[in-house]
Image (spheres, grey):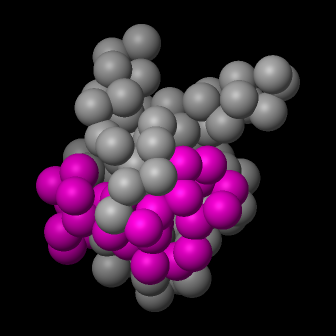
Amino acid sequence: RDGWLICATFSSCSSMENGQPADPADWAIADVVNYFRAAGFEEQANAFEDQEIDGKSLLLMTRNDVLTGLTIKLGPALKIYEYHVKPLQTQHLRNSAL
């Protein structure tokens, strides 16, 4: 629930601003990188670029993918998954069900 509130504060989660599509499934790799930079994960955002994670890939990521597949330290990886990846996945599923 807290993760959803954090996600909702970012314009990219709910509208088309700064040229970023509202639906994360439509994000390019650069959109994913910019999202995490804007969220305060400047250093970790590069891992998404290195692994070529676009919006569709982001929405398919599991907790294990984020914790072990991105070469990100455990603390930031846990926050990225819990407060960003998981809420984006939940939002996408809710919007897709409408």
Regarding residue 81, the answer to whether it shows in the image is no
Q: 24 and 77: which one is in front?
A: 24
Placement of 3 over or under 40, stated as above or below: above
Q: Position of residue 77 (x, y in %)?
A: 35, 51
* Magenta residues, dominant SS class: helix
> In the shown orientation, is residue 35 left or right of residue 65?
left
Quadrant (top left/top right/bottom left/bottom right) for the C terminus: top right
**Residue 7 x %, y %:** 37, 34
What residue lies at 68% left-to-right and 56% top-to-bottom?
25
For this view, does 53 lie left or right of residue 5? Answer: right
Asked if residue 93 is positioned above or below residue 98 in the image, the reply reads below
Q: Residue furthest bottom?
A: 50
Q: Is residue 89 magenta?
A: no
Would residue 80 be seen by someone viewing this image from the given angle? Answer: yes
Percent across and percent down for residue 87 are 50, 31
* 79 relative to 70 in the view: left or right: left
> Which quarter of the figure has residue 11?
top left
Is residue 30 depicted above or below 81 in this figure? below
Residue 42: % across, % down: 18, 69
> Residue 4 occupies which quadrant of the picture?
top left
Q: Depth check: 62 or 3 in front? A: 3
- The number of discs equals 0
- Quarter of the figure with the N terminus: top left
Magenta extent:
19-44
Q: Residue at x 57, y 75 (%)?
A: 28
